[in-house]
Each structure stands twice: as C-alpha cells, then as structure tokens.
Image (tube, grey):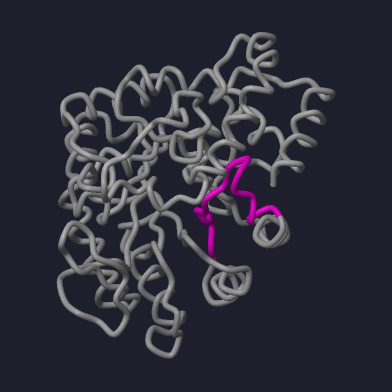
C-alpha cells in the first residue's frame, strides 16, 4: 500500500487510518461490544490501515484501554496516536465540557501534559506514542504559554516517549507559532465534502510549512455513508444531535446530493461513502484520512475507497454539486 509522510517526522503511513472515537462508547456513541471493537482494530491493521488514533476523552479512557488490548502482540506494526491537554484529574481555569457527568478541563501546562502521557502509555500498554496531539488549544495563551506546551513535547520526544508532534483544532496563527517555537508535524481537523473550512484557512499554511493534515469525520459522522435517512433518530446525548448537518434542512440537502450521485456509485462499483472518501483524497495535497469503525465489516467497506480513481470529468461534476450545496 502506498505511503505518505507525517510532516517532517520521517514516519511513513498509508493515506487512511482508523479513528476510535466511537469505540469509546458512552453517551456520545452508545454501547459497544469491546471484543467486536478489538476485532475491528486488528482487521484494520491486517488491511494496511496501520495508523490507529485515539484519545483519553473518548469514553473517558475507554477507547485507549480497548486500543491497548487490541494492539497486544502487534504494536510494532502500528503507528499509534493519542492526545493530551483534556483531563478531569483536577479543575483548571478552562472548563472544556461535561462528558457523561464528568467535568473535563483543558490543561496545556508541561506538568499536566507529561502526566497525561504517562497515563496513556499505561492504558495503551506501550512505552512510546508515535504521534501526540494537543486535543484542544487554550483560549488564553497567558494561562498556558505555547512555549511551555512545546517544552513538554520536546522533553517527551527527547525521552523517546513520543516520535512526532501534533495539534488538533487549531488556527493558522497557532500552526505558525508551533512551528516557530519547536516544530509541528501534523494537525488533525474536521474535514469532509460538507465541512470544508480547512481548505481556505489551514491547508495553505500546512502546504507552506510542510505540516501534514489528518482529517477526522470525513464521512460527516456517518451521514455520507448513504445509510442515514430523514427518519433516522439518534438518542439524547448522541454527538450527531449537535452536528448541523444532521438537522432537518441540511440533512435533506446532503441526502439529495448523495441521491444525485447514484450513477457514479454504479459506475465505480462503490458505496456513497467510498465515493465521498475517494473524492476528498483526490482533491488535496497528501492527506491523511481518519475513518471511524466499530466493526470489521465497516473497516473492510472503508478501505475500498483507496482503490477508486475518480475521472476528471466526474471530479468536476462533483465539485460543482458540492459548491451549489454549500
């Protein structure tokens, strides 16, 4: 499988990786069978999706614990990323949100980041993390100066506990600051054919500075799979209830778009989700796409997108359709 670099880190990975947000379960995603989740992770690795991404907040540690169990005996085959700076061990001046009755805080101090990583290493059953992201940034840099945050990363890197530096949910100015102060290999941002903010503000900066971009929710939390209909209902607390694209008017627009591409799914012998992923991968500079899956068959379905090559005329048609929609 063809590989692309993660920024300046020297780490090479296939364009698609596995995100494990949903595997964390909880009110965001509902209950999971952990054994099925483990089978999905191992199936992803077998199919070449070796970049596995997780975070402590996904299920309040549960996702990391499941990933750690899944990687037993195969850790050397995997590029593993997790995140720091969201914690619930102590209060800080920066509340993040309530998660399943637990108040989560942002803390980008050196001491807290190092404590985050030590906990993640234990849950993930490993002695190093390939890519460490700051999950969310501080709204007030006077509380947690970037110099201190980067010092934590560089210290962990010197100790061999992380290999590459990442940041999630950032602005162009924050990207430039990270690079200037100590280096940045990759950012992780929401990016789908429906949510395209990164194309105008972040992608140009990434290209200029040699920073990779890893796209999360490229299927817009399942909306672009073709399996969601207008009468699909999600329980209270489900993360999709707060996604604007799942609201009535915008959901109808998205489903109308997918219906208009039925001839393309027949032409390329693929699902709507495969088509959406293939389109996204074809438009940008080398892009890391993070697909979520809780079952082995979902992994098998997503990986098919890597073999689809959309023709130029069809790409132009899809681009026009998307521009009209947005």
Residue 315 x, y percent position in the rendering: 77, 28
86 up-or-down from 267: above or below: below
Q: Is residue 311 left or right of residue 187?
A: right
Residue 270 position by quadrant: top right
* Residue 194 belongs to magenta span: yes
Residue 192 x, y percent position in the rendering: 58, 42
Residue beneath the point at 26% across and 48% down? 236
Residue 14 x, y percent position in the rendering: 52, 32
Residue beneath the point at 73% across and 60% down? 208
Nearest the viewer among 167 and 259 is 259
Residue 47 position by quadrant: top left
Q: Is residue 113 left or right of residue 253?
A: left
Q: Is residue 223 left or right of residue 127?
A: right
Q: Which residues are magenta?
A: 184-199
* Residue 311 belongs to magenta span: no
The residue most toward the bottom is: 142
Residue beneath the point at 30% across and 23% down? 295
- Quadrant where the image shows the N terminus: top right
Nearest the viewer among 49 and 301 is 301
Residue 119 x, y percent position in the rendering: 18, 59
247 up-or-down from 219: above or below: below
Q: Exactly how many numbered labels are in the figure?
A: 0
Nearest the viewer among 299 and 115 is 299
């Amino acid at each position: 499988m063809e590989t692309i670099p993660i920024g300046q880190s020297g780490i090479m990975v296939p364009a698609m990786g596995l995100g494990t947000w949903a595997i964390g379960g909880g009110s965001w995603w509902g209950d999971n069978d952990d054994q099925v989740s483990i089978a999905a992770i191992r199936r992803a690795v077998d199919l070449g999706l070796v970049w596995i991404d997780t975070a402590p907040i996904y299920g309040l540690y549960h996702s990391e614990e499941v990933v750690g169990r899944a990687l037993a005996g195969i850790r050397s085959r995997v590029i593993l990323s997790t995140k720091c700076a969201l914690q619930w061990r102590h209060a800080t001046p920066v509340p993040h949100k309530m998660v399943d009755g637990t108040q989560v805080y942002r803390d980008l101090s050196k001491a807290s980041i190092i404590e985050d990583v030590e906990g993640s290493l234990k849950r993930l059953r490993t002695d190093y993390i390939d890519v460490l992201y700051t999950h969310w940034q501080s709204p007030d840099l006077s509380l947690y100066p970037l110099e201190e945050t980067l010092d934590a990363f560089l210290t962990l890197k010197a100790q061999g506990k992380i290999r590459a530096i990442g940041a999630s949910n950032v602005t162009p100015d924050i990207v430039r600051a990270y690079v200037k102060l100590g280096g940045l290999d990759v950012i992780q941002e929401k990016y789908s054919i429906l949510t395209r903010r990164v194309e105008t503000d972040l992608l140009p900066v990434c290209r200029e500075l040699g920073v990779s971009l890893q796209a999360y929710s490229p299927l817009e939390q399942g909306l672009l799979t073709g399996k969601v209909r207008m009468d699909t209902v999600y329980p209270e607390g489900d993360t999709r209830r707060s996604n604007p694209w799942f609201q009535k008017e915008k959901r109808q627009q998205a489903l109308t778009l997918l219906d208009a591409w039925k001839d393309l799914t027949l032409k390329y012998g693929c699902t709507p989700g495969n088509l959406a992923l293939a389109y996204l991968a074809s438009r940008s500079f080398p892009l890391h796409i993070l697909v979520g899956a809780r079952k082995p068959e979902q992994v098998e379905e997503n990986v098919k997108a890597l073999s689809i090559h959309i023709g130029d005329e069809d790409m132009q048609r899809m681009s026009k359709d998307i521009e009209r929609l947005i």
